[in-house]
Image: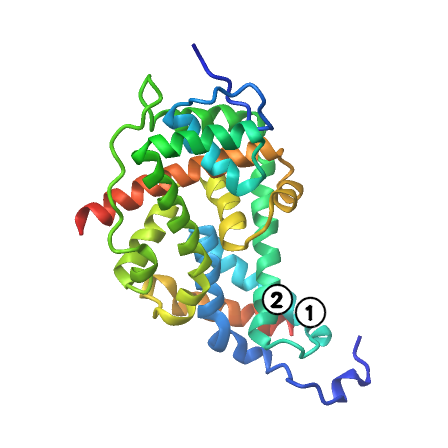
Amino acid sequence: MKSSKENNNFPSKISDPETWVESHGDYLFRYALMRLRNRESAENMVQETFLAALTARNSFSGRSSERTWLVGILKHKIIDQYRKSFREKPISQIQTEEEQTVDQFYDAMENPKGYPKDWMPDPVKVLHSKEFWGIFKGCLGHLPERTASAFSMREMDGMDTDEICKELGISPTNLWVMLHRARLQLRACLEQNWFEKK
Amino acid sequence: MKIPTNWEHETKLPLVTSCKQAARLVSISVERNLSIREFLSMRIHLWMCKTCTRYRNQMKALRNIFLHHEEVLDNVPASVEECLDQQAKEKIKAKLLKKA
């Protein structure tokens, strides 16, 4: 692949790989940590991303920034990681487990246990507060691993049902039950740890 | 009596449904179009039930938080736990150098 391409003047040129870790390492790590919630896995993902980028650096077109390009590689690596974790355990177990978790939020009459509090101030207004963000990440970390993975794909990466099901090899029903559980659990956790204490 | 919890399109859902079912419908409505039956069940319940209306609004808020998360990555400074430690950085640099 080392052709005259390298001599062309691209809109933006790739920097020396030796500088990547210092200039993008922390950003990529935070991005991965948000989605994997585990330092070790996030570190591995960053390393894998840089190694893959090194191999593919001649294909960098310069149409996007170097960071956007690296984030794109990282995204793929993270989805590979999710896929692996979904293969480890038969999917048939998921649904029963998830339905049981949903049940714990309701009494025998199917009424919610506890009246939802008024969320004040609007969470979007406190989003940039370090404290809120810390609690939010903590709550995400309390979700079971695979539920959180499916939820990240849906809410953080904005993927739709078809794409997620194809990647993870699960049915739409599997996915929807997991997403519902994640929402119930996150709601309860945020309320308990943030809104009730304000 | 146990109400069926079918996640695919539902035709036999009672029009007056429980909070648990209503919350489920709110969640499904984010993922796919509801059938007319499902939609009516959800609307009727929300119209009568303050708890679930609040729940529905909180679900919206939750989605909004995620929509803004990349903005947060750019604007809220990372805490120490959100950064690679020096040891990890050196390790990755060494691997890169070896491969280059």
Tell if the residue under mark 2 belongs to the same chain as the one under mark 1. Answer: yes
* x then y, percent, for residue A28: 49, 66
Tell me the residue at 65%/43% (across/down): A162
Give the alpha-carbon distance from disc 2 to disc 1, as whole Å: 7 Å
Chain letter for mark 1, please: A
User: Is residue B84 at least partly visible in the picture?
Assistant: no
* Quadrant into which the N terminus of chain A falls: bottom right
* x then y, percent, for residue B77: 34, 70
Residue to which mark 1 is pinned? A55
Q: Nearer the viewer, residue B66 or A76?
A: B66
- Image position of A166 with respect to A35: above or below: above
| Type of amino acid at the residue the image marks with label 1 | Thr
As helix, strand or loop, the secondary structure at mark 1 comes to: helix
| Type of amino acid at the residue the image marks with label 2 | Leu
Tell me the residue at 35%/68% (across/down): B76
Residue projecting furthest to the left: A197
Q: Quadrant of residue A84?
A: top right
- Image position of A148 with respect to A158: above or below: above
Labels 2 and 1 touching (C-beta < 8 A): yes
As helix, strand or loop, the secondary structure at mark 2 comes to: helix
Residue to which mark 2 is pinned? A51
* x then y, percent, for residue A45: 54, 58
